[in-house]
Image (spheres, rainbow, N blue to C red):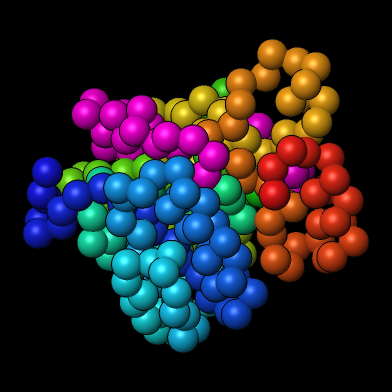
Amino acid sequence: MAEGGRRGRGVVYIATGAAHAAAARASAASVRRTNPGLGIVLFSDQPVAGPEFDRVAAVAAPHIRSKVDYLPETPFAETLYLDTDTRVLGDLGEMFRLLERFEMALAQRVHVPASPARSVWRHAVPSSFPQLNGGVLLYRSSPAALGFLADWRAAYAEAGFKVDQITLRELMWASDIRFAVLPARFNTRRYTWAHHWFTATPRPVILHTNRYHPTKFGPVRAWLDGLTGPYR
């Protein structure tokens, strides 16, 4: 499948700073192990080299959410964007099948802090409309999807929020774009030994957890979190 010169399926990372670039390599290695047929591209301001990536492209004018600038620049016809604090643990083929019917697919952000993530930019959105997690984002390189991502880039720059979910949610509410909400196993935020052995919780396909975040909670919290689950 080719759209606008873009071809195939692949995973995109967008990482600024040495710590996040290193985390992207670790996440990409998990994609290589589990889905060897997918292409992997990194956008970064760091000189990254390694077998995990097919290509590394430069990020100009990096900032805390450079991902909103480079999501539309994917070289793939079908793209899975992943934050760097992720591990892919299973086959992604069923996930990409969503793009046969939808332009985009995102996971619901279930635990939403009171502030600033619940702030309003331009329009109040009904509380029944979910806030979506921008760290696992599946999309086609269609005019509709790339146009939406370009609008998000402009909205984030204009709004001035540090977090990106506020503008994402408001734009999604106002848009006619066809999108799917992913089941939790494609964006598992917490998975402990108790989940693994003593519940019927589905095994994660994508684990997206603070234990893999290079800076958010510091080494002690990351170490403690790592003890609670079966995946490293």
In this view, 205 is above or below 55: above
Residue drawn at (69%, 42%), measured in percent from left and top? Answer: 231
The number of numbered badges drawn on the structure is: 0
Residue extending farthest to the top is: 200
Snapshot quadrant of residue 18: bottom right
User: Quick check: 150 above or below 196?
Assistant: below
Q: Is residue 149 left or right of residue 169?
A: left
- Asked if residue 95 is among those painted magenta in the image, a careful observer would answer yes
On the rendered structure, is 83 left or right of 110? left
Q: Is residue 194 above or below residue 125?
A: above
Give coordinates of residue 173: x percent, y percent.
42, 36
Of residues 163 and 3, which is closer to you in this image? 3
- Give the image location of residue 132, x and y in percent: 53, 39
Range of residues picked out in magenta? 88-115
Q: Nearer the viewer, residue 34 or 84?
A: 34
Q: Is residue 225 visible?
A: yes
Residue at 64 percent across and 74 percent down: it is 19
Q: Does 13 sit left or right of 139 as displayed?
A: right
The image quadrant where one finds the N terminus is top left
